[in-house]
Image (cartoon, rainbow, N blue to C red):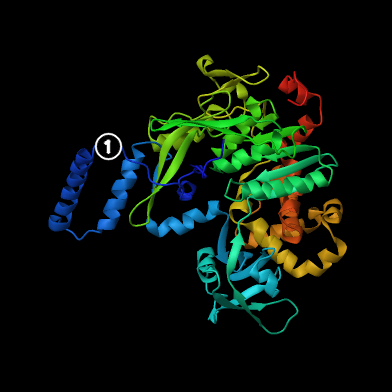
Amino acid sequence: MQKSNKYLLPLLFAVTLAAGMLIGTKMDIGLNQKVLQSKNDKFNEVLNYITSSYVDTINEDVIIDDAITKMLLNLDPHSYYIPAIDMAEVTQDLEGDFEGIGIEFNILNDTIIVVTPIAGGPSEQRGILAGDKIIYINNELVAGKGISNTGVRKHLLGKKGTEVKIKILRKNVPALIEFKIVRDKIPLVSIDASYLIDKNTGYIKINRFSAKTASEFKTALFTLINQGMKNLILDLSGNPGGYMDAAIEICDQFFNTRKLIVYTEGRQRARRDYYSDISSMLPHGRLVVIIDEGSASASEILAGAIQDWDRGVILGRKSFGKGLVQEPFTLSDNSSVRLTVARYYTPSGRFIQKPYKNGTEEYYKEMFIRYQHGEFYAPDSIVFPDSLKYKTHNGRTVYGGGAIMPDVFISLDTSLNSNFLRELISNSIFNNFSIQYIDKNREYLQKVYPDLSAFKNKFKSETIIDEFLEFADKNDVQINDNDYNRSKPIIFNNLKAIIARQLYGDDAFYVIVNRYNEMFNKAYEVINSKQYDALLQVKIKNN
């Protein structure tokens, strides 16, 4: 069966729930037109009374938008309204690109600093370098003026083909350097990391399922296989979802026979089955998929299919529990309604949507309730009713009724956390210190550590910890000795990982930071042990 035109499975929280993409065409509403007209007349009557008689001046657009929003809140937590003014911004993330000059930046000491030019983007092509400080944008002084991240984007983002002029300050260059950069489409990458852990085992982390994720994933997978990879750890932790088609196309890479991946069904939507293709790149290698409470929608489709077919081991914590499919409908003013039109089910027939009968606010509080109830720490605290019991291909028991439960549970590890560590993170001390440190020592670091391997093996963040703590103190984060001693291993590791990212790219960050990632470490242990086959109860080789 041919695949769909990108059904949208919206993201986890309210802000990202606004992300989406127009697809398909409007469906026949199916109501008696006279009844519908009568309801419209009633709404218009009230609106006319308000505009003609209400004591204060009102904004009709705001009233109408609020009415639509509240109407959808009475349906389910994933049906929502996007005003026309917000459409471009909210579709950007899942479309997989934006238009601008192509830099990653940070603001330090009231100055825009280029963390890195995006590979292949217009800034890299014009010669912008990591560490460059942007002083002027289109002859407007932006350094020392209190510019915000939003302000930077307002200045630098723009329509493809338009020009922006910047003047930068570069270390060891006495005068400002002027660049004229023509804006272009800049890819938003959804693969955070892709690298070999050892000669046989690879690691790929996906942060969302956008229009380009499947293509990015296949490129990463192809590269790792060419490097000798036989087994894969696929990290979907914190991945809030996105396009269902992207999840299905990624599933394709793990099956060499036609398999049901997911099916959808709704009151006005007949059942529709979605199958894998047979052009797989990794049909037989071992596979461990990492999920957690932030893994939702498309992440759960992928994990559910892998689990139901016993194709791999699911490891981590219970997922979010989102099993509803949204379809976008464009309104006359180019605003959009994302309306739930169907439910999706895993191959075994599981419906994994968690309940929402108590309203949207309670629905999103459920995560906090799970935390209080101990579900992040002990699998025994998670109860699934026997009425929602299903069987995998090999006869293992799995459950529906709210989320994907992993085959291997990993509790949330808070043993190294502290208030001091949280303040370092929330105040961007790691990032800001690293930018300043690299700006001062870039040539030395590149000479002593010419590649990631040298940096990983030889760089000791302990040697700069006094400088780091002094920087934190100057930025109003006071050291607490007990907290510092408790969190010291993570502080050292995070500092090293963030410096590595700015020197060698995103893969380098995960190579180092995963050292203290309990789910990663357990996944690596499982994929290289007899426990893997025991967990799957493998009855048919290369199933």
The crowd level at tag 1 (other Cα within 10 Å; few <14, some 14-19, many 20+) is few
Judging by the rendered image, the residue that carries numbered circle 1 is 31
In the picture, the quarter occupied by the C terminus is top right
Assign a secondary structure to mark 1.
Answer: loop
**444, 315: nearer the viewer:** 315
Q: Residue at x 70, y 57 (%)?
A: 469
In the picture, the quarter occupied by the N terminus is top right
Most extreme residue toward the front is: 1
List x then y, in percent, for residue 95.
Answer: 54, 53
The amino acid sitting under disc 1 is Leu
**267, 401: nearer the viewer:** 267
Question: Does residue 379 sit above or below 228 in this rendering?
Answer: above
Most extreme residue toward the left is: 53
List x then y, in percent, for residue 24.
Answer: 45, 46
List x then y, in percent, for residue 17.
Answer: 47, 46
Q: Quadrant of residue 266?
A: top left
Q: Is residue 396 visible?
A: yes
Q: Is residue 485 visible?
A: no
List x then y, in percent, for residue 74.
Answer: 33, 37
Q: Is residue 277 left or right of residue 455?
A: left
**419, 457: nearer the viewer:** 457
